[in-house]
Image (cartoon, helix red, strand yellow):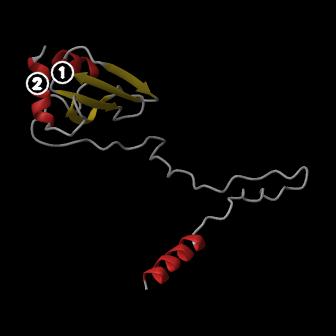
Amino acid sequence: MRKLLVSSMALLLAACATAPITAPPPPPSRPPGQVQQPPPTQPPPPAVGGFRSVEIMRGPGLAGVIEERAGSLIQQFGTPRLDVAEGDMRKLQFSASACVLDIFLYPLRPNGEPVATWLEARRASDGAEVDYLACMQALRQSR
């Protein structure tokens, strides 16, 4: 019985042996002169009056931060660790030993000056989300 079990296992292992791996065949070639067109995409929805609307963060303790200009934020939290502009958006990043605060600024009107519309706070050590009010307080105290 034992010999039968051993020989059955040997046959099973032999059946599981991998076949040599072959490369897939190359894709079919296009006739000369034929250009491959990219797949169609839908254009982004048009902005109202050529201007996109911006979501503004609301919540307790955000007065004096949300809808403030960069100068006011720098007065409150100190020199930003990062100041990144991309198009009409600006991101200020403030950092203390306790946390990192990212504040996103967008213009609320066409050709308007960007103001704070959103913020995110995380621990400096591992990036875990933290309470933004506690982070803002820590940054203000570290000045």
User: Is residue 34 found left or right of 6 in the rendered image?
Assistant: right
- Residue 130 at least partly seen: yes
Q: Are marks 1 and 2 in contact (CB under 8 Å)?
A: yes
The residue nearer to you, when weighing 53 against 61, is: 61
Residue sitting at 14 percent across and 30 percent down? 135
User: Circle 1 — which element?
Assistant: loop
User: Looking at numbered disc 2 in the image, what kind of residue is underneath it?
Assistant: Ala
Compare marks 1 and 2 and give the one earlier in the sequence: 1
Residue, disc 1: 96
Residue sitting at 69 percent across and 52 percent down? 38
The residue nearer to you, when weighing 92 against 107, is: 92
Measured as percent of width and height from the top left, residue 110 is found at: 41, 33
Quadrant of residue 61 within the rendered picture: top left
Residue, disc 2: 138
Measured as percent of width and height from the top left, residue 79 is found at: 25, 14
Residue sitting at 10 percent across and 24 percent down? 138
Q: Quadrant of the C terminus?
A: top left
For label 2, the crowd category at 10 Å Cα-Cα, with few meaning under 14, some 14 to 19 and many 20 or more, is some
